[in-house]
Amino acid sequence: MANENSPLLAYRLLGEEGVSFPANGAGGPGGASARKLSTFLGVVVPTVLSMFSIVVFLRIGFVVGHAGLLQALAMLLVAYFILALTVLSVCAIATNGAVRGGGAYFLISRTLGPEVGGSIGLMFYLANVCGCAVSLLGLVEAMLDVFGADATGSSGLRVLPQGYGWNLLYGSLLLGLVGGVCTLGAGLYARASFLTFLLVSGSLASVLVSFVAVRPRDIPLTPRPGPNGSSLPPQVAHFTGFNSSTLKANLGAGYAKDYTTGATMTFASVFAVLFNGCTGIMAGANMSGELQDPSRAIPLGTIVAVAYTFFIYILLFFLSSFTCDRILLQEDYGFFQAISLWPPLVLTGIYATSLSASMSSLIGASRILHALAQDNLFGAILAPAKVVSQGGNPWGAVLYSWGLVQLVLLAGTLNTLAAVVTVFYLVAYAAVDLSCLSLEWASAPNFRPTFNLFSWHTCLLGVASCLLMMFLISPGAAGGSLLLMGLLSALLTARGGPSSWGYVSQALLFHQVRKYLLRLDVRKDHVKFWRPQLLLLVGNPRGALPLLRLANQLKKGGLYVLGHVTLGDLDSLPSDPVQPQYGAWLSLVDRAQVKAFVDLTLSPSVRQGAQHLLRISGLGGMKPNTLVLGFYDDAAPQDHFLTDPAFSEPADGTQEGGSPALTTLFPPPRAPGSPRALSPQDYVATVADALKMNKNVVLARACGALPPERLSRGSGGTSQLHHVDVWPLNLLRPRGGPGYVDVCGLFLLQMATILGMVPAWHSARLRIFLCLGPREAPGAAEGRLRALLSQLRIRAQVQEVVWGEGSASSQEPEEEEEEGDFVNGRRGDAEAEALARSANALVRAQQGRGGGGGPGGPEGGEGEEGPATALTFLYLPRPPADPARYPRYLALLEVLSHDLGPTLLIHGVTPVTCTDL
C-alpha cells in the first residue's frame, strides 16, 4: 500500500506524528490546492453540455420526424434507463472512498485492477480525443453552412472559403482556442463552460418561447437533388402552432430516407443517433481531480444533470410533435432557426454546444491521460503527460492530447469515427457497472457506499445494456473495441502493474472459494475420487528445489502445501518472526512455477512444528493426507539456486523493482558436519507421528540427481527411454504376506501411475517387481498381479525376480517371520542389516537392465544393459514401536536405499484404488 492513500485519510485524521494528511484522497494534479471546483461548475455544467451536444439543436426533428412521438419517447426512456443504471454505479463507487484524479479510469482501475483499468482508461482517453475532433469538425461544418462560400439557402453569407485545407485550418484554429482554455487550467475552463452554459440555456429558452409565441407559418425547404442530378420541386413545410391534428399525425412512426445520407432510417439507426448525443455522463467524473469534494459532487451533480437534460428532451419532443408537421421534421433538421423569434440566438446555441463539447472532451482526456501517466502503466511513452504547473494543472497532458486531436483532424470527416467514439464510451460505462457489480458480489466489508440506491441487479442490467447498445450501434466497432481491450490488457499483464491497488478479483475468488469449500463435505469422500494432497516439509529451499518440483508433479490436481518450521518460542521474542517470511516463500513458489500454498509455523522443535502443520494446514475438505520429507542422510546439501536458470539473480542481489533477491532471503545450505535442526530420533518420530495421524508418508532421497527435463512443466524428451521401478512389497519382510496387494503396495502403484500422467514423465515406462523365493513356483504371483493391474487400468511391465539375486548371499528369509521382526529388533541387528543389504543389491541389480518378462521370458542377464531407471518407488516399513530403535530403523533405511539414485520410500495407510465405475 505504499503508493496508495487510505480512504480514511480523506477526513484529515492526524498521523502518529501529528501531521495532517491531505483531504479527499488528494492525488490529482497538484494535490488539494488544485481542488477548486464546486458541484455546479465542476459536474453539472460540463455534464449538461456534453449530454446536449449538438443533438439538442439539430437532431430533435430527425428523431421525432422518423420515429414519431411515441417511439421517440420510448427511445429516450430506454436510453436514459441505460445511462441511469451506469449513473447509479458511478454514484456507488464515488461515495465508497476518496476519489482522485482520472475520473472513470480511476474508478475502474482501482476496482478491476491495472490491466483492465489501464486498457479501458486508454480507450476512454482515445474516445475523448476523437470526440473532441468530432465536435470541432461538427462546429466547422455548422459554421460553413452559414458562412461558407458554398453555403446553400437564402441566409448564407458566403464569406469563408471552403475545401479540405481550409476546413483543416478552421478546425486547427478552433482547437487552438479550446486547447488554450484547457491549458490555462480548470478554473478558466469552468468559467468558459459556465458562459457556454448560459448561452446554450438562453438559446434553448428562446426556442421554447418560440414554440408558444410564434404564429403558424409556412417554411420553404431547400430544393433537394433528384435521381438524375436535377433538382426536385421545392417543398413547403408547416409550423402549425399547437394543433391536435398535428400531434395525432406525429404520434406514429414514419421512417423515410435521411436527406443528408440517402439511407432509409430504422428504429435502430434513429436510436443510435439519439443515444450518441446522450453519452456524456462522465464529463463531471473526469474532473474528479479538480473537485472540492468529489465523493459528494460526482453523484449529486451527475444525477441533477441527467434529470435536467431528460426533462428538456421530453419537453422538446412534445413541443415539436404538437407544432411541426412531419415534412418539416424530416426535411429540415435545423428547423429551430426557422421558427425562432431570433434565429441568430439558435445559431449561437449550436456553436456554443459544439465548442463546449470539444472543451469537455479535451480537458477530460487530459485528466485521464495524466492519471495514466502517473500510474506509469505504459512506460516512458506517457512521461510528458506527468508535467504539471505550480497550480496543479497538467498542461503536459493537455498539450499531448492537443497534438493527438490535431492528428485526428487531418482525417477531415469523421462520420465513421463517430460510432467508434460512442462504442468506446459504452465500454467504459460497462466497465463502471462491472466494477460496481464485482464489489457488490464480493461482499467486501469495506464496500460501504453512502449512496445506496443500487443493487447487483442494476449493475448487471447496466453491463448487459451497454454491451447490447454497443452491438446495436456498430457491431464491427463493438467487436474491434473488445479485441483492442483484450490486447491492451495482455500488454499490461505482460508489463506487470502495481499490486497495491487491490483487486476485486481476489475478493470475488475468496467469496467463491469460501462458498464451495463449505459445500466440500468430507463425509462424502469416495475412494474413486481420491487424489494426493501433499504437505512438503522444507528446511531450506535452496537444497530442496528438485524435491519441491517433484512433489508438484505428484499432486495430480490436489492440495500442495509447502511447510516450514521456524525454531523459537514466541514468549521470548518481541514479535512473530514467521510473518515477514511469507513474502519470500511466495516469491519462491512463483519462481519455481509450482502450484503450492505456503504454511509457516513457529515451534520449539521441528517435530512439534510438523505436528502443528499436519493438524492445521488446509481447510475443510482440502487438508493434506500425505507428508513428504527429504531423506535424512549425511550427504552434503547442494545449492540449487546457483544452478537453476529460474533463480538466476543480478550481481547486486536485487530483483526488478528493487526487492531483495531470493538468494539473500534464504540462508546458504548447511555446511557438511554442521549441527542440524532435527535429530535422527525426531526425524523418525515425525514419520511415526504422521502415521499415527493416519497420514501417508513419502521420504524422498537423491532427488537432486533427477535430470532437469523430468522436473519441467513441459513434455519430457523421448530420445532416451527411462524406467520408473516400483517395488510394492516390504523388502525388509519380502515373504509372509500378500505383498503387492496390501494397502501400502497399492498406494505405491497409485503414486507411480500418477507420476506417469505428468507430461514430463510420459516417456518413462513403469516396471513392477515381484520377489520369488528359490522354492516358489514362477508365474502364479505374476498372473494375479497382472489381473489386478488390468482391473485398475494401470499399464505396466511386471517382472519376477528371485530373492537374493545380485547379492553376495541368496539366503531366503524364513517363512515364519512376522511384520516388524527386523525393524523392531526381534531379529538381530546384524541379520537385519544383512537383509537390507541383500534387498539393496537386488534393487540395484535390476536398475539399468532391459525390460524382460517374468521367468517365462528373457530375464536380462548381468551383461544386458537397457534403459536406466529414472526413479525408484520402495515400500517404507513402519517405524518400530520402541522409540529407542528409531536410529537403528533409520540406519536400515539408509542401507536399503543406498546408491539407488532418485528414490521415494512410501508408506500408505489409506485405500486409494477402486475397480468400480
Image (cartoon, helix red, strand yellow):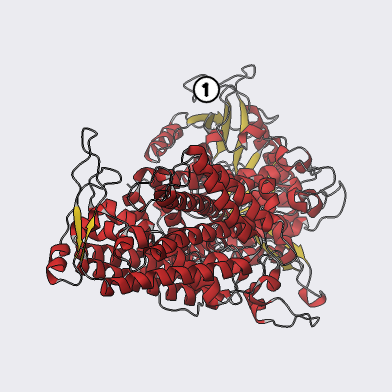
State the residue in front, 107 or 359: 359
- Left/right placement of residue 415 relative to residue 16 reads left
- Left/right placement of residue 16 relative to residue 77 reads right
**Residue 416 image point, x, y percent:** 40, 43
Residue at image point 70% right, 50% down: 383
Residue at image mark 1: 852
- Left/right placement of residue 887 relative to residue 250 reads right
Does any portion of residue 324 appear in the rendered image?
A: yes
Crowding at mark 1 (Cα within 10 Å: few <14, some 14-19, many 20+): some
Q: Residue furthest top?
A: 863
Q: How many discs appear? A: 1
**Residue 853 image point, x, y percent:** 49, 24
State the residue in front, 116 or 826: 116
Circle 1: residue type:
Gly
Quadrant showing the N terminus:
bottom right
**Residue 802 image point, x, y percent:** 57, 30
**Residue 907 image point, x, y percent:** 58, 50
Under circle 1, the secondary element is loop
Residue at image point 43% right, 59% down: 430
Q: Is residue 10 above or below residue 74?
A: below
Residue at image point 53% right, 70% down: 195
Does any portion of residue 825 appear in the rendered image?
A: no
State the residue in front, 603 or 227: 227
